[in-house]
Amino acid sequence: ETNAAIAGALDAGATDIVVRDSHGSARNILPDLLRPEARLIRDWSTPLSMMEGIDRTYDAVVFVGYHARAGTPDAVLKHTMSLSLTDVILNGVRMPEGGWNAAIAGHYDVPVVFLSGDSAICKQIREVIGPIETAAVKESMGSTALMLHPTRAQEMIRKGVAAALRNLQAYKPYKPNPPYKLEIVFTEETLARRAADVPGAERTGELSVAFTSNDLLDIVKFFSLARRR
């Protein structure tokens, strides 16, 4: 599916493509199987996490293989960043990973133009950041996934990415308004207590901690620190 997204970008005339491996260890994509037109970022280091490498030189971001936020009904592999979190709320909006990452891209004035995943996240991402091109390659049946054949899924992704990039003017960066308030809800009180030790953090409930700043990157750094403690 990653290669299909690359192919779609090439179809639309892209000349510089960067792939960010963003699941688990961030060392999932086998470099020798990736299309040679793309460069690959692996492993974890900076607070930007899944959006590491983003800057203002990019024209667009596409998300491949995404899932809905924790607690979403009828969704495949639903969670938000970590199984230790039950909610991530930015300026009052409950965030899926796609929404959080779109806000980081928006900080650099880069729009998210395409997302693939199950039908739940395709609906959810449009509710959070507005209309973008999507490809629902599976849907949930309880804990079961009803999936398209990989060939069909790849075809949808390739066509969707190409269509989105050919219509860039239709998409705007997702830019929540400052001041930014991030509230994190944990699964355990101990995790919330530890996160509250981050300078500037505010304990807002038995399981929740919040942080407010006029700089989105301060919010991103807090989120990174709070999840590590």
Image: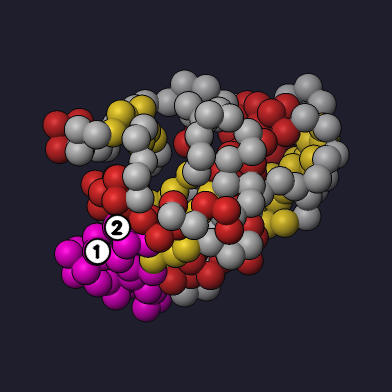
Residue sitting at 64 percent across and 47 percent down?
Answer: 173
Q: Quadrant of residue 125?
A: bottom right
Whether 138 is among the magenta residues is: yes
In what element is the residue under mark 1? helix
In what element is the residue under mark 2? helix
Report the disc number at residue 158: 2
* Residue 56, horizontal then vertical, whole percent: 58, 30
Left or right for 126, reference 44: right
Callout 2: few (<14), some (14-19), or many (20+) C-alpha neighbours within 10 Å? Answer: many
Report the disc number at residue 196: none
Q: Is residue 180 above or below residue 11?
A: above
Left or right for 123, reference 180: left
Q: Report the number of discs.
A: 2
Residue on which disc 1 sits: 155
Would residue 213 be visible to someone looking at this image?
yes
* Residue 90, horizontal then vertical, whole percent: 72, 48
| Amino acid type for the residue under numbered disc 1 | Glu
Left or right for 137, reference 121: left
